[in-house]
Image (cartoon, grey):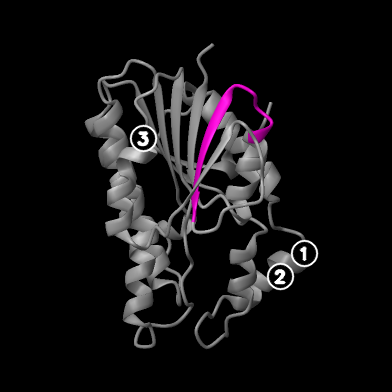
Amino acid sequence: MKKSLLIITGHSQGLGKAVLDYYLKQDSFQILAISRTKLEIKSPTLQQLSLDLADLDILESKLDQIFPDEEFDRIILLNNAGWIGKIKSLGKVNPKALRSQVNVNLLAPMYLTNAFIKRYKEKSFEKIICNIGSGAAFRPVAGWSGYCSTKAALAMFTEVAAKESASDNFHFFSLAPGIVDTGMQGEIRESTVEDFPELDKFIDFKKDNKLSSPGLVAQKIAYLFDNPSKFQDVIQDVRKFDLP
């Protein structure tokens, strides 16, 4: 029996780990999970690849290994890995850190998306590419220059990919997961008001229990993947649709 394949980046923590946990329970899925850190998980459906997505030369050398020739009923690429970066106002940003942020948040998903389309363009099975976006792609946030910029660029890249591949049985999404209770939110709360004027608001999100649970967001992502034809727009936000 043919199975579906999920290729996910950034699976070792946060939202990526919640998505991984969800799909490990789905017997119909094989999973290729990519992160710098491998998890101590033994499962016949899981293959892990240790890879630093900031190192684009290494990533490029692994592309053939990431995208198999095996036939599946559908293949999903979830570019989930991302980095908020050092929350600093411009003038204080470290150039090397900024380069790593651009590599992880933007160029690595572009590399993977390009390779995915090249490998599977002529295949008739269902193909889904979902790039985890952010509301910050459409709203300038002081202290987040690299994050806002890379997410904005990734959203446009996803829209262009969708326009080019509309007739090739692809579904493309740039998906904002909302404000999720992950380690990234912890990093945000550890910043300073000087570098991040909205700090108090984000502290209140946690204090007032306004953060979404990673598990719930993972379920919503899975619902999107199971029902892609219900979501016609490339730009999506999990806060705008409900589970049945």
Residue 72 at x, y percent in the picture: 44, 20
**Residue under pointer 3:** 67
Callout 3 secondary element: loop
Q: Residue at x 69, y 44 (%)?
A: 215
Q: Check disc 1 and report its element: helix, strand or loop.
A: loop
Q: Is residue 116 above or below residue 182?
A: above
Q: Residues within 10 Å of mark 2 (few under 14, many from 20)?
A: few
Do the CB atoms of the residues marked 3 and 2 lie less than 8 Å apart?
Answer: no
- What amino acid is labelled 3 in the image? Phe
Q: Is residue 156 visible?
A: no
The amino acid sitting under disc 1 is Asp
* Left or right of residue 183, residue 133 in this image: left
Q: Is residue 207 above or below residue 3?
A: below
| Magenta segment includes 93 | no
186 relative position to 144: left or right? right
Residue beneath label 1, please? 208
- The location of residue 158, given as percent across then percent down, is 33, 43
Q: Are marks 1 and 2 in contact (CB under 8 Å)?
A: yes
- Judge by depth and name the residue closer to the eye, 72 or 220: 72
Going 54% across and 11% down the picture, which residue do you hit? Answer: 1
Q: Residue at x 62, y 34 (%)?
A: 23
Position of 175 with respect to 109 (left or right) is right
Q: Position of residue 143 (x, y in %)?
A: 45, 77
The residue pinned by badge 2 equals 204
Per the rendering, the mark at residue 192 is none
Q: Say what amino acid the circle numbered 2 marks.
A: Asp
The residue furthest top is: 1
Residue nearest the viewer, comparing 180 with 47: 47
Q: Residue 97's image quarter?
A: bottom left
* The residue stretch that appears in magenta: 24-35
**Marked residue nearer the N-terminal end (1 or 3):** 3
Instruction: Give the structural element (helix, strand or loop) at label 2.
Output: helix
